[in-house]
Image: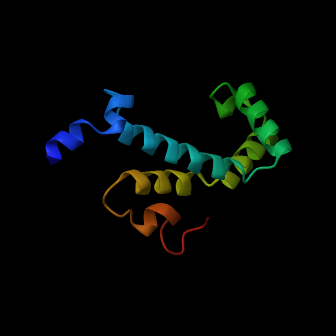
Amino acid sequence: MLRFLLRRSPLTRLAPGLPLGGLLLTADVALLAGKHVSKLDRDQRRKLLALVRQARGRPSSLAEDERRELFTLLAILEPRLFVGAAVGRISPVPVPKRLLYGARGAPR
């Protein structure tokens, strides 16, 4: 009976072959990314996008003050915390705190 119910669930009828777990995890990471991007205000987001476009993937092509501003804006986004939180959501094993926040006593 259980096998019949699992095969005939509404999700399997609505989306055959769709990896629902992967879709939910992707949505969860996208929401987490949105929270991190919302740490920047509108002007900062525009400036960040303009600097990334201007750099074309190579921060060395920017002037020193522009490069410093780019790294300052990226630091506000806290990429280490974002990646650690995303891995923490996906991984069944707990992520060590030092991977999220760095070594104890290390400069931030």
Please, is residue 18 above or below residue 69 in the view?
above
95 left or right, relative to 69: left
- What quarter of the picture does the C terminus occupy? bottom right
In the rendering, at what x and y percent does residue 54 appear? 75, 26
Q: Residue furthest front?
A: 1
In the rendering, at what x and y percent does residue 50 appear? 78, 31
47 left or right, relative to 71: right
Q: Residue at x 54, y 75 (%)?
A: 105
14 left or right, relative to 65: left
Please, is residue 79 above or below residue 13 in the view?
below
Instruction: Please state which of residues 23 and 15 is positioned toward the viewer in this rendering.
Output: 15
Q: Which residue is drawn at 35% across and 54% down?
A: 91
Please, is residue 81 above or below residue 24 in the view?
below
Where residue 24 sits, quadrant-wise, is: top left
Instruction: Please state which of residues 69 and 97 is positioned toward the viewer in this rendering.
Output: 97
Where residue 88 sits, quadrant-wise, is: bottom left
In the rendering, at what x and y percent does residue 70 appear? 73, 42
Q: Which residue lies furthest to the bottom in this view?
A: 105
Q: Which residue is drawn at 83% across and 44% down?
A: 42
Q: Which residue is drawn at 65% across and 52% down?
A: 35
Where residue 5 sits, quadrant-wise, is: top left
